Amino acid sequence: MGLLKDRLHRWVDAQFSPEFLEKFRALPTHQNEYGYDSFGFHREEAKIAALLAQFFHRDYFRVESHGVAEVPAGRVLLIANHSGQLPYDGIAIAGAMLFDHDPPRVVRAMVEKLIPSIPFLSYLLARWGQITGTPENCIRLLHDGEAILVFPEGSRGISKPFTRRYQMTDFGLGFMRLALETKTPIVPVAVIGAEEQLPAFNMKPLARLLDLPAFPVLPIPPFLPLFPFPTKYRIYFGEPLQFEGDSDDEDEEIAEKVKVVRNRIQSMIQVGLEERKHIFW
Amino acid sequence: MVGPRHKIVITGIAGRLGRLLARRLHRDYPVVGIDRRDFPGKPRDIDHIQVDLRSKRARDVLRAGDIAALIHLGVMHDPRRSGADHHSWNVQGAQRLLDACATYGVPKVVALSSANVYGPRADNPQFLTEDAPLMAGQDFPAIRDLIELDMIASSFFWKSAAVETVILRPVHILGTVHNAPSNYLRLKRVPTLLGFDPMVQVVHELDVVEAIVCALRPGTRGIYNITGPGQVPLSTLLAELGRPTLPVFHLLAKPLLSALWRGRFTSFPVPELDHIRYVCMVDGSRATKELGFCPQRSLKETIRAVLG
């Protein structure tokens, strides 16, 4: 068992460029004597996720990232549009921060609270640096100087039907309260290409029946693996925005600030769409 | 530290933790123990009063005066005993002791609760602070009396301002103690849940003794989470002990354990499964800052302590 694991790790190491490996090993983390940080992140085990991210980033979606160098060091909130039925956009953003940012940065995404009750995902995502999406966790990691990825649209955004592509749904307000409380810069991120990876129809009657914003149905025969189309991803990192104010303000006050971020992302999406010549390359 | 020559009363002194605490304190203070169990190998200068802590004689100990502090470790946690027994012992018993402390002017009370009162849950934040709600009873009704005990002590803190009340909520205590986590780690083949490997926090029994000693310092009061040297995945803990594991599919684990429990083949009630499935970790920074408590044992030492 140990031998197998050893060989796997050696094979994984061989897939990365030596420069990347060296930088990855030099990443500052708060690890204990067993190699885990307090959220269960383990650098060696996270390499498997990095390999997966490298495949999607370099080979599959051929991610083109713009402005990633401008992402400030230290604590930062990456706020992005969410789309494409399955969260490959999260993997692509994490890949961009890992492979296009110098030094590489491990993005910690706030995952659905359901995840800890799903076998294997429950601990694998934790080993790879992903954390259960509670405000307390986010504040703790921001104080540790981490980069946190938030999709304020949540499941509303990712489950949009194809007809509403690149139209963002409502943003949650939580991220802004966290940014204000911890005085964290917000980097707006626009992802182009994820909307076309898994075009879905909206089953309106079902959505109404279940009281959901949309009930996406994929035109793919059942039991086939849900693999996305190899669209080309373009990720635009905007200039960091710094907001001031009381994190305990009324919802209306917070919503005003959130709107600034949302509009910024929407205009970055527009620019990205205009620059794009083709969906697949 | 409280002044010398004043007595320190320890309930549950004959338990493993009680004995360790008594040995730590008896050279500096006169120690009086209340426990109906035997105290084998008791140091001679410890006064062991072998009575039920609910009895009038236990109350008389507090009435005698000249007491610097009451350390309440006498908690019953035997999942096989009835709920009524637990309630009478843990809730009514504690209430009577606390009332007596207020009546007879005991200046300090230290109550040992547990970080388990927060409860392991899928949507727990990674680190719970002392202000987090005590949710353990939601899925584990049998430990409601322990939550109630914690709450009685918290309300006593507010009601009797003259008494310095300290409530300690340590994470899983490992060592020679006979508690669920230590017993679990001592199993010959340790069942785990397939696909679950939560981060867990452990603390050495002697570090808990030190935390209690820290809590005795005059002026300290409040609720404190007590954490050990860090947190590791459950699998790392088991690997460190070299224990073979037996991963069980989580949907089968519940009915299986329930059958074993009914057949009296195990001492672990079904809701304990959540502890090897979800996180229940706490933030111990308040104890570090205000109590000056800092665990002395390394993670490795703490984990290996269950081997005795």
Image: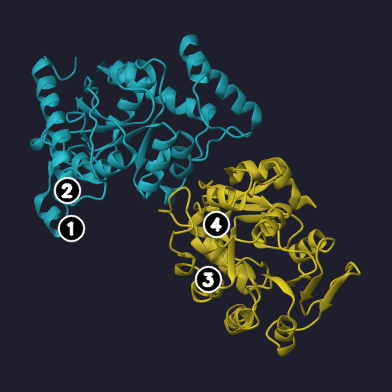
Chain seen in yellow: B
Q: Amino acid at mark 3?
A: Phe
Give the chain letter at badge 2.
A
Q: Tell me the quadrant of the picture where the N terminus of chain A can be found.
A: top right
**CB under 8 Å between discs 4 and 2:** no
Q: Residue B133's x, y, as percent?
A: 43, 63
Discs 3 and 4 lie in a common subunit: yes
Give the chain letter at badge 4.
B
Q: Amino acid at mark 1?
A: Leu
Secondary structure of residue under mark 2: loop
Chain seen in cyan: A
Say few, some or many: other residues with alpha carbon within 10 Å of mark 4 (under 14 / 14 to 19 / 20 or more). some
Q: CA distance from mark 4 to mark 2?
A: 35 Å
Nearer to us: label 1 or label 4:
4
Q: Residue A183's x, y, as percent?
A: 31, 36
Q: CA distance from mark 1 to mark 4?
A: 33 Å
Q: Nearer the viewer, residue A209 or B300?
A: B300
Q: Nearer the viewer, residue B213 or B226?
A: B213
**CB under 8 Å between discs 1 and 2:** yes
Secondary structure of residue under mark 3: helix
Q: Which mark is residue B275?
A: 4
The image shows residue A272, relative to residue B258, as above or below, that is: above
In this figure, which residue is indicated by the disc labeled 1? A210
Secondary structure of residue under mark 1: helix
Discs 4 and 2 lie in a common subunit: no
Nearer to us: label 2 or label 3:
3
Nearer to us: label 3 or label 1:
3
Q: Amino acid at mark 2?
A: Phe
In this figure, which residue is indicated by the disc labeled 2? A215
In this figure, which residue is indicated by the disc labeled 3? B157
Q: Is residue B38 visible?
A: no
Q: Residue B123's x, y, as percent?
A: 40, 53
